[in-house]
Amino acid sequence: MKKFYVTTPIYYVNDVPHLGHAYTTIAADVIARYKRLKGYDVFFLTGTDEHGQKIEKSARAKGMSPKELADSVVVNFKRLWERLNISYSHFIRTTDDYHERVVQEIFQRLYDKGDIYLGEYEGWYCTPCESFWSKSQLVEEKYCPDCGRPVERVKEKSYFFRLSAYQDKLLKFYDEHPDFVFPESRMNEIKSFVKMGLEDISISRTTFRWGIPVPFDKEHVIYVWFDALFNYISGVGYGTDNEKFKKYWPADLHIIGKDILRFHAVYWPAFLMAAGFEPPKRVFAHGWWTVEGRKMSKSLRNVVEPNRLIDAYGADAVRYFLLREVPFGLDGDFSHKALAHRINGDLANDLGNLLYRVLTMTIKYLDGVIPEPTKDRDRQLEELSLKMLEEVDRFMDVQAFNRALEAVWEVIRAANRYIDVSAPWKLSKEGRKEELSNVLYNLLETLRLVAVVLYPFMPVKMAEMLEQLGCPSEPKPEDLEWGRIPVGGKVKKGRPLFPKLDEEEIARRVEQEIKEGEEMAQEIGIEDFAKVKIIVAKVLEAEKVPKTDKLVKLVLDTGSGVRTVVAGVGAHYSPGELVGKKVLYLSNLKPKKLRGIESQGMILAASKGDKLYLPEFPEDTPVGAEVR
């Protein structure tokens, strides 16, 4: 039996599962299910990445151990995969003891071989990404090029992997395996990156403890990316079941997000070459999702929570939409309106209505019995269905999910037209039983094949559809042939597979949620307010700024010194009125030049319409008193 080994990345346990996690995992599941349907022995691996400084910091902030934090988050991933009907073979955690042993063994092997050596690292480090960067890679010389957060300068002893020694081997491998990275544009990016020159990379840390210890030097823990990537071999039996490992390795397909392509297409094959393993056959880097035209952001409160989608639309509809809406590999925009439109159009109108019409006519005209066709029946739908099987197979081999689904919908639309042209109601009325039986047989068998092909995408709904067609609910490889519907069996109508949605109501609800999200995004936490220092200051001097109507230069006594501020209060208060007043002074605002005068902060006032009001204080309010 042919084998197929597919993986997702292992997901970092520093956050709850989101749309991106679901997208990757659904794609891998559809491939796994399709390959099983084609008769392959499939191993499908997913799991969680649980080591590193971010986990250690997050756990400390929550008063938990890192393992306790990981345990609490892993449950969320497993529950979501269950709700999305993810058919994984094994769920790996990098805290599993067998994985830790494998990582230490490989590290030791590469050290003994000379591909790992002790050195000293000095450079720029991004804690959230757990990545080192050269100065030339930084944005504005101080921000991480991946996440945009500030980096910090670190200097520490480190073990290095001789990545530079594998530059030519990698380029040769890419030339010999042009399909190693998909889409093609990503392969070009990787080649360009490697051709620019590879430096040795740091693969250990001493500044935190939550990681796998270097086996021969307990002062160091192994870099989280070296640790994590080897899940792809430990999770499929290396070190515990070597027969299984030999059976499935090399992996046929790693499905990842484009942000971690460099780790999978440069570092990973180099690590494997050094350790004496074959690299995987393909790495597919898919794009990112925006939401309603905006980047997903916690501050905008627009991060799509997959469980809410399942509650609102059902797991199979979500699975279908994510792989139908956007070519796999490109960025896409998630929209509730677009999802509802797909459900109503593709699933309810096209597929659901076709099933309903054919079942209704079979029950009405043939008492629900699946008819036996004659040899001289027309072959139009049969030919289209067989062509569909070939096209779906071709597109699935290159992970073109949307094109595979479009090939299926061409047949669904053709079947709806076939009903209108053949007019079974007319054949029944005229007593043309043989023709009627042939037409309904063609339609029932087309629907059966459509359900079988769509089963990897929508396993629950297609199982229901097959049962309504009088077929086993779980298709087998031999069902990917024309003529497998059980003649003489009975069909039965069930509940609608995809009930129609109120698209206008969904649009109104989403608009309201976006509005509320924008309003909530303007809220600040107590930690934000704590950054602001507002004190009571006394105006010592005041004078109009020349050639302006509103600006007044104020000299303030802050209780700890004298500061100059330019304030836009001249239209409401004369300089004489201001002298001696106690005002609210924002003292830690970054200085800014206004009309050539350096304004060292800001005074605060209330306003409504055209009116401006400076706050009043009792005489005994001390200068320098802080607002809390």
Image (spheres, helix red, strand yellow):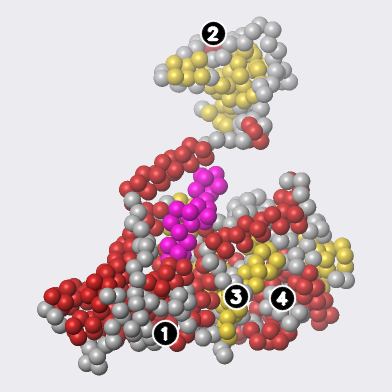
Provide the residue span drawn in magenta.
Answer: 296-320
> x, y (%) of residue 404?
40, 76
Outermost residue on the bottom side: it is 375
Residue 220 included in the magenta stretch of the image = no
The residue carrying mark 4 is 234
> Residue 577: which numbered mark, if any?
2
Dot 2 crowding, Cα within 10 Å, few <14, some 14–19, many 20+: few
Q: Earlier in the sequence, mark 1 or mark 2?
A: 1
The residue carrying mark 1 is 480
Q: Can see residue 265?
A: no
> x, y (%) of residue 465?
39, 71
Q: Amino acid at mark 2?
A: Glu
Q: Between residues 519 and 560, which one lies in front from this camera angle?
A: 519
Residues at circles 1 and 2 in contact by the CB criterion of under 8 Å: no
Q: Amino acid at mark 3?
A: Phe
Q: Please state which of the two labelled residues, at mark 1 or mark 4, is closer to the viewer.
A: 1
Distance (Cα) linking label 2 and label 3: 77 Å
Q: Is residue 237 left or right of residue 376?
A: right
The residue carrying mark 3 is 44
Dot 4 crowding, Cα within 10 Å, few <14, some 14–19, many 20+: many
Dot 3 crowding, Cα within 10 Å, few <14, some 14–19, many 20+: many
Residues at circles 1 and 4 in contact by the CB criterion of under 8 Å: no
Q: Earlier in the sequence, mark 1 or mark 4?
A: 4
Distance (Cα) linking label 1 and label 2: 89 Å
Q: Amino acid at mark 1?
A: Leu
Instruction: Work out which quarter of the rendered image holds the C terminus and state it.
Output: top right
Q: Earlier in the sequence, mark 2 or mark 4?
A: 4
Q: Can see residue 510?
A: yes
